[in-house]
Structures are given as structure tokens and as C-alpha cells.
Image (cartoon, rainbow, N blue to C red):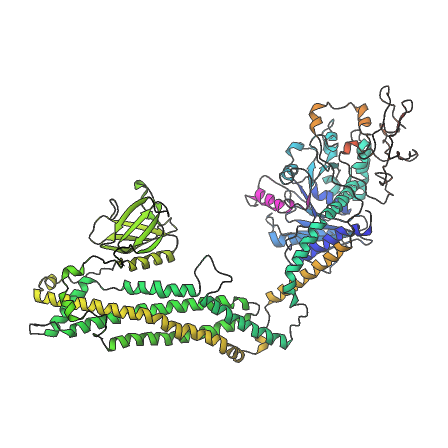
Amino acid sequence: MGNRGMEDLIPLINKLQDAFSSIGQSCNLDLPQIAVVGGQSAGKSSVLENFVGRDFLPRGNGIVTRRPLILQLVNSKAEYAEFLHCKGRKFVDFEEVRLEIEAETDRITGSNKGISPIPINLRVYSPNVLNLTLIDLPGMTKVAVGDQPHDIEHQIRDMLMQFITKESCLVLAVTPANMDLANSDALKIAKEVDPQGLRTIGVITKLDLMDEGTDARDILENKLLPLRRGYIGVVNRSQKDIDGKKDIRAALAAERKFFLSHPAYRHIAERMGTPHLQKTLNQQLTNHIRDTLPGLRSKLQSQLLSLEKEVEEYKNFRPDDPTRKTKALLQMVQQFGVDFEKCIEGSGDQVDTSNLSGGAKINRIFHERFPFELVKMEFDEKELRKEISYAIKNIHGVRTGLFTPDMAFEAIVKKQVIKLKDPCLKCVDLVVTELVTLIRKSAEKLGSYPRLREETERIVTTYVRERDSKTKDQVLLLIDIELSYINTNHEDFIGFANAQQRTAANATKKRVMPNQGEILVIRRGWLTINISIMKGGSKDYWFVLTAESLSWYKDEEEKEKKYMLPLDNLKLRDVEKGFMSSKHVFAIFNTEQRNVYKDLRQIELACDTQEDVDSWKASFLRAGVYPEKDQPESEDAMNPSDTVSMDPQLERQVETIRNLVDSYIGIVNKSIRDLMPKTIMHLMINSAKDFIHSELLAYLYSAADQGSLMEESAEQAQRRDEMLRMYHALKEALVLIGDISTTTVSVPLPPPVDDSWIAKEPSPPPASRAAAATAAPPGRPPAVRGPTPGPPPPLNPSPAFGAPPVPSRPGPGQAAYAGDPNSGSVPLIPSRPARVPPALPPGIPRRPPAAPNRPTIIRPSEPSLLD
């Protein structure tokens, strides 16, 4: 490994995994790990059990692994297992480990063969393992069995993708040898996420179950479907061996014997089997971690910096410190007041760009909703004239009046002013609702202390409700003040002389524009015209509303005008939203029953939100287009004579009073529209702000003692503990990474596999395979060969096996023997496994390494070990 620091790499990553798993998050770090993928019953779990040397994984038919199992193998003198969810408990009996895995799986997924992405963390300490971390994932399947969900295939695939798409994850693709490699699910999914093959290691299982006369030699020699990290073959226990409780050590000996005795595999036997796979994974994971250390360190540092500020207040934290509680209470109440005021007055920080809220919504209530409510209650012309005529007649009594009675004017005006109470009270209610929402929103930052948040919301909301009743009393007082004195000397009042001069034609006079030379544009914006599909379907247009017309264009450039609709005799009406439509609709129609657009009696205009509809309606009000009045069944049908028996003198009197009422009600509306926002702001909103700043703290102290108010929520305490654990885990990780030397001698990533020769060159005969396998390793000078007459005779023929192992020659700085069990270093992983010879058998003398600056000369008369 080079130094002790590198051997701490895998335990370091284990500590990080435990720290981040225990706090329920990954800290946005992709920790280096090995994910085991493959089809169901491909032998993934058996490979892991062979690593440990114990039976500890659930067994059965169908899908058995239903949650990811993060298996951390730690080399130790004692042998036991620990689960992250059972802290402090050591499992010595591995049968209990299996039962615990099954119980923990069923606890999350139930017993219906469902799956879950929540991992189980298991750490196994044993003298028989190397430091290694693997993730056993559910096997890929095609068809749902029993009561599995019908999309089980996609669920498993999505779960696998969560792990193997990360660049820091090595993929251990397990494929059984008795299926075609081209149909391997594991290699297929690995190819999707790792097309260059940088992170994929192939494992071939069930080599002993292949049909007689077939072998996987081309696969294991990396010729059929080449991988940059190559393939390793293993032989697991059969189901009969498992049922018969065959010892895993015996199974490993049988595996070793199988590779040494099989004619197709014995020349590569030293690079096959579970022990070699474990060594390879240990080394490749260590190298992989070493390669990712710089990026991991920078991520850890950035995470640490982001936590520093929040952790600062928790470093010397004492939950029962009264000083801290008093300071926190004052800060919380002050912050609540600041947030509430910002919501009302508006601020530049944390601006909501999706919805109106706070002061902006209250402003909209004042200047759009309230005026709209006032205009909605605009009197019906026919009904008003009838009321005026009845008032005149009742005032004259039995006499025929010669003059217009002013008492009729006062009676009608007072009746209309009283109608203002409902929209004014509704305006107050809308503002109160918005204020309660603001209080709740501003109190969200007090969530760390549930009792404080609850009391603050209760006290401030109660105060707002109290001010609500006082504000309504003041609003009603304003109405009563208007009723108490009808000021006919107001400068804007037209007076009796002017009213008598107006004729019936003047009542329907055309609108006078503010500036005759200009067109006053009231509003622009996009609207959808709802038209049936038979007539062309709904379309979006750019609308421009002026004081005298409504025009729509193709787009906002306003170059291509589609239509212009005069506003004379137009009114608005509400339309119910369609069953399949998500838009809000209102309509425009002509009161004289004329077509508005083409052959349509009304056009329906649609907006995305109800707020847009209300805003457009308010704009139409400014242009003089009012909402339609619900016309109840009037008494016209019952008493037709009442409306037609009006003599010319009475008609003139009605028209005069009508003009007077219209003028005076306009003055009252203008006054109420101006006073209502001022009254609400003074009596409710400003009063609430003053209350929060000056009196809220006193009310809180009287409501409960400081200890109960500042009692932390369980979530806050847990969050603080998690943050501190995360902080210390990050600091420890950075310390450990800093102690590790990254200059360790290790094997670099294998070069890309050149598979272009596979199709061009025929497979060499068996006699020349040994010669092909003895090419000089990379980095050494090429050997100069003399003419060799024919293939060389075999060296040291062994009576036990047909072909002996071929000796290898170590290069400088490498281990003496690639498979020497006494060697302290881990065997190197070549780029092409077929070209690496097995270990040198005992008794064969080693030749010294070649001189670095001149080629090695091999005499043709002597048989060379390299041949």
C-alpha cells in the first residue's frame, strides 16, 4: 500500500458514511464506494458472503435483497458485526445478523416483496477480510411476481441509478457464466452510466455450471466484451451446498482447486477466485479514493465553511442558561416586529416574485377591490327612477306638486349612502384576513420555540381582532357622519339650477375624454378570447383598454390590430370556469342585445388567476364599463301602470332629482374611497405595529414564564445535534485526509482497451497462447529476440495438471510475485489480464531485472522463460 496513511482511506470513508447516514443526509458529498449490480440470482450475495466467510445474508426465491445494504468490511482480530440502527450492540452469531436484516427490511418495506431506497448499514469486523466497502443492491428483474408493484422493474432501476450514476461509485457488474454476456443486465446498465468503462469491474459467477464443452475463457481474458478493469471469475456454493451448510472455507478451497484443474482457466488461476477479487477491490477502491481525495477535500471544506456561522452559536450551548434564554427571547420578538413591518412597508431583500403578499396585497384591496365593490352596488337606473317618483308622490300627498321637493332628494341620497356600509365592512374584513396571514408568516422564524410562536401568534392576532371591531365602529361612524348632514353647498355639487337644465339625452351622453388630443390608455396585457373550436378556437391576444375602446392585437408590438370594440353600452358579467379549464373567465356584452364581436352577443375573456380577473375588472370600471346587475323580478309586470302613468311635469322632477342624486353620491363615494384606507391604516395596521414594538414583550411575560416560552422543540434540538455531529464529522474527515500522503505508489488507471484486433486477427492456437501471454510488461525495454525454430517445449511439465504455470518476472518497484501469499503488497491489476503470467512456482530461480538503459539480449539457442 505504500504507507499506513493509505490504509486508513477506506475506514475514513466508512466514518463519513456512518456520520452522514446517522443524520439522514449525505451532506451533498458523493463518497467513493463500490455498488454491486446484477440480475436476480446472479450470485451477488454469495460473493459478499465469500468475502466475509460467513452465512449472514437472507436467502430465498425471487427478490430477496429489497433495500440497499451498505456492507463495511473492517480487518480486525475479533469477529463480530454491528448495525448502524442498533448502536452499541455486537452480533457474534451471524444467524442473528441475517434475522436482523430481514426484520429491518420488513420494517420499512413490509412483507409484500416491495423495495425501498433507504439503506441498511452493516459493519463486519473479521481477521479474514480486507478493508472494503460495498453496497449490495436489489437484483434487476423484468416481471412483477405475486403482490409486487407492477412497476417493480422501473423502481429497481431508479434505485440502482441513484448509486451508480455518481462519478465516485465503482460498479461491480456481476454476471452468471451460464448466460450470454451480451444479454447481461449488469453490463448493460453499467455501460449506460459508464460508457468509457472507467468505473466498471466485471465479475463472472457460476463458471462450474456451464454446459460441458463450453468455457468463459475469452471473457476472462478480456477478449469478448473488453473492460478497462477486466473480469474476475468466481465459483460460489451451489444451493445444495448452502442447504447442506457447507463451510465457506471449504468452498474457497474447492474454488481454488476448480481453477487450477480446469484446462481453460489454469493458466490464469492466480487471477481468479474470491480472495483475488477481494484484494483487487481493496486496491482499486483505495486507489479510487486516493484519486478523488482532492475533490472530496474541497467539498468538505466548502461544507464546513457553510456550517461555521450556524454552529458558532451552538459551540458553547447550554440549554438551561437563563441569560441565553433572555437574549434569545428579546432577539426573537425584535426580529418578529422587523419582519412584520417589512411585510407591510415592503423591502428589497427576499422579494416574493411569484405572488402578491403583505403590503402590496393590502394596497390592492384599497385601490382595486374596494372601488370595485363600490361600483358593483351602483344603483339600477329603472329601479332608482321608480323610487324617486314614489318619493315625490308621497311627499306631495293628495296635492299636485308644482315644484320639485328637496325632501325627496334627501330621502333617496340617504338610502344610497346606507348601502355603502357593506362594501366598507367587507374591505375591513379583507385587510384583517391579510394581516392574520402576515402574522403567521412572520412567526415562522420562531418555529424553534413552539410555545413562544404559539403565544406570539395568539397575542398579536387577538389584538388585531380587537382593533377590527374598533375600526368597523369608526367606519360606520363615517357613514353616519355622511348621513347626518347633506351638504348641498359642496363645491363639486351641481345644484338645482344645473340639474334642471340637463335633459334625458344628456343622461346617455357620450363619454368625454380627459384630453381631447390624446388617447388615455388605462391598461395593456395578454388575455385569451374563448371561442368554440368550430369558430377557430381560443387564442391569446394583446389587449389595450382606453377610455373609449377596447382593442386587441396579434402581439405586444401593437402593429397588427385584430379588432377595436367601442365601450358604449358595454357591461361586464361573471362566467363560471369551464370543467376542463384552469383559467378564470369574465365576459363583455352589449346592453342593447347587439353583437359584440363578429356574430357573438358576448365575448369571454380568460386570465390565468382570479387576481388578474379582478384587476382587469377594476380597469374596466375606470373606463366606465360596469358589472351587470342581477335583475330581480320587478314589479313592472304586476303594476305596469306605475311606470307609464308618469306625466311630463313629474318626469322632469324625477330627472332633476336623478341628476342631483348622481352628483352627490359621486361626492360621497370619492370621500369614502379616500377615508377608508386612512382609517384602516391608522386604527389597525399602524396600531398593530406599535403594539408589537412596545407591548408584545410585556404580554408574553404575563402569559407564561420565560422557561416554558423558550423551551426548544424536539426538532430544533435534533437539528442542533445533527449540525454539531455533521460539523465534527467534517472536521475529523479533513484532519484524516490531511494526514494521508497522496504520493503513495499505487497502480494507475488501466489504459483503454484496444479491441480493434479482435475481429481482424484469428484466435491464436493453444500452443501460441502461452507465448502471447509472456509479452514484456509496459515500461520495460522491448526484448530483442533471435529466430526461434517453432514453439518452445513446455517448462517443468507437472504430472498433476496438463499445463504448468508460467513464471513471471517482476519489474522494479513491484512485488516479487504476483500471487505470493507472503508478499505484503497487493497484486497489480494489468490492463489486459490475458497477458499477465501467473506466479513463479517454487524451485525456479529468478533472473535479475534487465538494465534500465539497454535491451535484454536473449540467445536463440537457449529457451527463454519469457517464451
Residue 778, horizontal then vertical, whole percent:
80, 34
Q: Residue furthest top?
A: 789
Viewer can see residue 99: no
Residue 843, horizontal then vertical, whole percent:
93, 34
Residue 77, horizontal then vertical, whole percent:
83, 53
Residue at the location (25% across, 44% down)? 598
- From this view, report whether residue 218 is shown above or below residue 655: above
The foreground one among 264 and 457 is 457
434 left or right of 817 in image = left
The residue range painted magenta reads 141-170
Q: Quadrant of the C terminus?
A: top right
- From this view, report whether residue 613 is shown above or below residue 484: above
The foreground one among 782 and 414 is 782
The foreground one among 290 and 25 is 290
Report which quarter residue 768 is drawn in.
top right
Report which quarter residue 256 is drawn in.
top right
Q: Residue furthest front?
A: 517
139 left or right of 704 in image = right
Residue 294 located within the stretch drawn in magenta: no
790 left or right of 748 in image = right
Report which quarter residue 765 is drawn in.
top right
Residue at the location (31% across, 64% down)? 371
Residue 63, horizontal then vertical, whole percent:
63, 44
